[in-house]
Image (cartoon, rainbow, N blue to C red):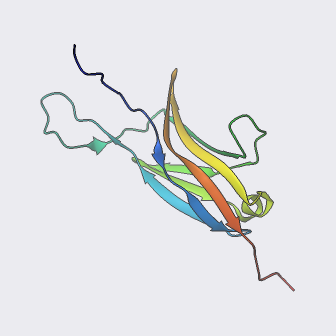
Amino acid sequence: MADAVTLVALPATVNLDLWRGDSFAFDIEVWGQPEPGDPPTPVPYDLTGAVPHAQIRVSPTTPLLGEFVITVDGNILTLLLLPEVSASLPRRSRWDVDLTEGDRVITLAAGTITLDGQITRPK
């Protein structure tokens, strides 16, 4: 009997430890597989027509708490968490980012968000 094979299609785990009320931005580079016959090195993924989304919730079934603003440049997604969003989040929540292309949805990264308190306040 052949050994069982496990296929894994889980997103990268990216946990965020942030300061409440601050802006936060980071990039995600998206890479694809080369065409058959090309050298076996990853190639920049063509994001033309792909629609990225990144949302924050306490758990998958709870109401939406906030979203990242996403810009696309080539194969790079820049995710920006605005200060008013980070100020309104609970101490612990979860986030993920996915790409939708037609009927296909791919979750690229997911993780937790842990916020610490803001010390400095405007006078």
Taking 66 as reference, is 6 left or right?
left
Pinpoint residue 4: horizontal percent, then vertical percent.
30, 22
Q: Is residue 46 above or below residue 86?
A: above
Q: Is residue 6 above or below residue 122?
A: above
Pinpoint residue 37: horizontal percent, then vertical percent.
12, 29
Residue 61 location, quadrant: top right
Q: Quadrant of the C terminus?
A: bottom right
Residue 85 location, quadrant: bottom right
The residue positioned 56% from the left and 54% from the top of the image is 79
The residue positioned 39% from the left and 47% from the top of the image is 75
Q: Point out the residue furthest to the front here.
A: 1
Q: Is residue 84 above or below residue 123?
A: above
Pinpoint residue 52: horizontal percent, then vertical percent.
55, 40
Mark count? 0
The residue positioned 55% from the left and 56% from the top of the image is 15
Of residues 84 and 91, the one drawn nearer to the viewer in this rendering = 91
The residue positioned 72% from the left and 65% from the top of the image is 83
Pinpoint residue 44: horizontal percent, then vertical percent.
32, 44
Taking 87 as reference, is 112 left or right?
left
Of residues 39 and 114, the one drawn nearer to the viewer in this rendering = 114
Of residues 84 and 5, the one drawn nearer to the viewer in this rendering = 5
Q: Is residue 96 above or below residue 33?
A: below
Taking 33 as reference, is 90 left or right?
right
Q: Point out the residue furthest to the right here.
A: 123
